[in-house]
Image (cartoon, grey):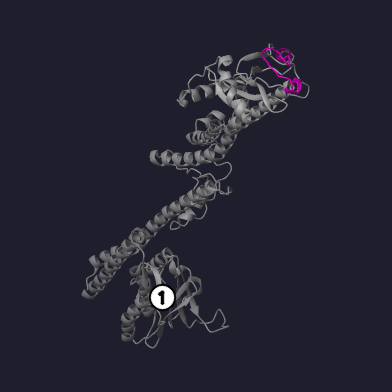
């Protein structure tokens, strides 16, 4: 046989503790800090890659990270700074090469004899041109001073033999070649302004530039063929000793050579882009997992709790995951949710406790009424009937006072939330209250002392509610004071707080009741005042003060270094409010 734990039916915490000891439902703090074996703990989500990819938040993180990378790469490809550098380097090398070829011809020219490149007088230009040994990819044209084509040299081989130490250009990966082709196609579509096709009969086109070359020296030009491939043409004069020009050397690069270099550079960039995309996706998934999974757990806990409460599936409560160890917003969110849930259930438990206390408090006058009514039926003497009627009237007044105070207390929370705080002068409010209540105290033979500062003390709050607190404290002090006692109300500003103190020279407060006096329905009054107070005044005052971010406490007045067991000189209530 199991021994039942001791239960106080007025204390819901005692009921919940007994329920836990007997294997009942998980309640109270166990909801916020559940046991490891708690069967209501939220199961961990399937941590698969597909589950993460299906997360809308994960997709957004990946998308935005990729968009930033795509915009960066597209901007580099569009601006194409490498093309300008490659073009300059290729043009410089061709200028050096054509001037070296011209020097070869000039070295064979006689000093003073006349020279005719077309007829071969003075120099065998054709033989020199045929014996040139140049790397492939260029055409050499030799023209005389009149613009007639003397000869042309072209490398018949498709590829040059490899040179040790000169790295070969790789073809690139299939994926990067595809991406490069797609970019070239898109660039061609959106370019729009295509240049007119040049005349590609170079043997007829180049002679037109011979006079300008003979007069102004070396020049270079970049153009495109009908297929859009870029090539360079550079021309330089062949000058006989003495400064007489006898011909022109033209060097023309292979069409598309620069485009191939740019495409190779673009493929390298796209290879880095592909690697960057893969790294970005992996890092985005890792980042998303640290965000999406915790948020999913929090959402699942909230949704499961809502469904259970809506469908009344189980009396158990769902655990909010504890992520407060994370130093980020998710940790703050988890802590806030857990705190909110804790505050919500504390409020629910407070309402339950309040309902239980109300039921208990109402039963006392009802029991007294029932007894008085039963006795009234049996009473024969008029004085007994009158006494029972007085008891009934007293209990009815007690019930009316109790119901009114309970109604005010139940509305207090919602009113504190709805009403807007405003700045007001606390000293002015206290001055009006002490003036009115001081007259009431003096009528009962109680000395009333108001010690308020002359300067204003402005605070933010609900003036009417705080006035209710001070009225209650001063009224309590008056009710506990007798003829010849004294009450003192004083206020002082202390840095960022203001202290309002109500003191009296009454009987004081029992040491064990200094904290209990702020509990609902607790009353520590003389026997002759029984039933004249609901015991909610100080509880309401504490609730109002704490809603304003302040504190309130009670203490007994004793001389300095007095024995704690000695009789107090009176009671003191202190209210601290932020300024």
Q: Which residue is mark 1?
A: 457
Q: Nearer the viewer, residue 391 or 32?
A: 32
What residue sits 50% from the left and 71% below the top?
Answer: 512
Dot 1, how many residues are within 10 Å of its Cα: few (below 14), some (14-19), or many (20+)? some
Residue 541 lies, in percent from the top left, at 39, 68
Work out whether 211 lies above or below 66.
above
Q: Is residue 391 visible?
A: yes
Location of residue 550 in the rendering, given as x and y in whole percent from the top left corner = 45, 67
- The percent position of residue 185, horizontal first and vertical second, equals 51, 21
Q: Is residue 271 visible?
A: no
Task: Decide: is 311 above or below 356.
Answer: above
For the C terminus, the quadrant is bottom left
Relative horizontal placement of residue 550, taking residue 289 as reference (left or right) = left
Q: Residue at x 49, y 45 (%)?
A: 25
**In this rendering, is residue 486 above or below 268?**
below
- The region drawn magenta spans 106-127
The answer to which image quadrant residue 528 occupies is: bottom left
How many marks overall?
1
Judge whether residue 123 is colored magenta.
yes
**569 vs 416, nearest the viewer:** 416
User: Which element carries disc 1, helix, strand or loop?
Assistant: loop
Q: Majority secondary structure of the magenta segment?
A: loop
């Amino acid at each position: 046989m199991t021994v039942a734990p001791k239960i106080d039916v007025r204390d819901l915490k005692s009921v919940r503790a007994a329920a836990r000891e007997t294997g009942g439902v998980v309640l109270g703090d166990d909801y916020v800090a559940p046991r490891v074996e708690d069967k209501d703990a939220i199961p961990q989500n399937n941590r698969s890659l597909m589950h993460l990819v299906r997360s809308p938040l994960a997709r957004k993180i990946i998308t935005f990270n990729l968009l930033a990378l795509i915009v960066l790469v597209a901007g580099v490809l569009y601006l194409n700074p490498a093309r300008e550098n490659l073009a300059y380097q290729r043009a410089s090398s061709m200028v050096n090469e054509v001037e070296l070829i011209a020097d070869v011809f000039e070295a064979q020219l006689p000093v003073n004899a006349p020279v005719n490149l077309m007829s071969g007088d003075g120099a065998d230009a054709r033989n020199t041109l045929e014996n040139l040994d140049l790397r492939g990819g260029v055409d050499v044209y030799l023209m005389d001073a009149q613009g007639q084509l003397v000869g042309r040299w072209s490398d018949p081989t498709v590829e040059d033999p490899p040179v040790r130490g000169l790295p070969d250009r790789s073809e690139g990966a299939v994926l990067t070649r595809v991406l490069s082709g797609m970019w070239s196609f898109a660039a061609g579509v959106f370019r729009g302004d295509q240049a007119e096709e040049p005349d590609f009969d170079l043997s007829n086109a180049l002679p037109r530039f011979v006079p300008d070359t003979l007069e102004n020296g070396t020049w270079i030009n970049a153009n495109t063929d009908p297929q859009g491939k870029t090539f360079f043409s550079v021309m330089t004069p062949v000058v006989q000793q003495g400064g007489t020009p006898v011909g022109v050397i033209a060097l023309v690069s292979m069409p598309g050579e620069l485009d191939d270099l740019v495409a190779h550079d673009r493929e390298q960039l796209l290879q880095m882009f592909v690697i960057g995309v893969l790294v970005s996706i992996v890092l985005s998934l890792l980042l998303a997992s640290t965000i999406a999974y915790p948020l999913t757990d929090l959402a699942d806990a909230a949704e499961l709790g809502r469904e259970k409460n809506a469908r009344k599936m189980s009396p158990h409560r769902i655990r909010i995951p504890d992520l407060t160890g994370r130093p980020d917003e998710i940790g703050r969110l988890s802590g806030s949710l857990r705190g909110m849930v804790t505050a919500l259930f504390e409020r629910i438990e407070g309402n339950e406790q309040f309902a239980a206390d109300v039921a208990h408090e109402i039963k006392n006058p009802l029991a007294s009424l029932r007894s008085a009514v039963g006795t009234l039926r049996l009473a024969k003497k008029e004085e007994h009937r009158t006494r029972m009627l007085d008891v009934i009237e007293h209990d009815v007044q007690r019930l009316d006072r109790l119901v009114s105070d309970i109604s005010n207390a139940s509305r207090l929370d919602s009113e504190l939330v709805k009403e807007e705080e405003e700045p007001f002068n606390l000293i002015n409010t206290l001055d009006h209250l002490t003036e009115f209540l001081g007259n009431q105290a003096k009528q009962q033979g109680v000395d009333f002392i108001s010690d308020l500062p002359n300067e204003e003390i402005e605070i933010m709050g609900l003036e009417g509610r705080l006035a209710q607190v001070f009225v209650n404290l001063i009224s309590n002090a008056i009710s506990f004071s007798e003829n010849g006692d004294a009450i003192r109300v004083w206020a002082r500003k202390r840095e960022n707080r203001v202290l309002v103190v109500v003191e009296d020279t009454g009987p004081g407060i029992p040491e064990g009741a200094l904290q209990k006096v702020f509990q609902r329905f607790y009353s520590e009054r003389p026997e002759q005042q029984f039933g004249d107070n609901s015991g909610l005044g100080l509880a309401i005052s504490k609730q109002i003060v704490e809603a304003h971010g302040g504190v309130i406490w009670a203490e007994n007045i004793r001389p300095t270094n007095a024995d704690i067991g000695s009789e107090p000189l009176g009671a003191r209530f202190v209210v601290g409010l932020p300024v």
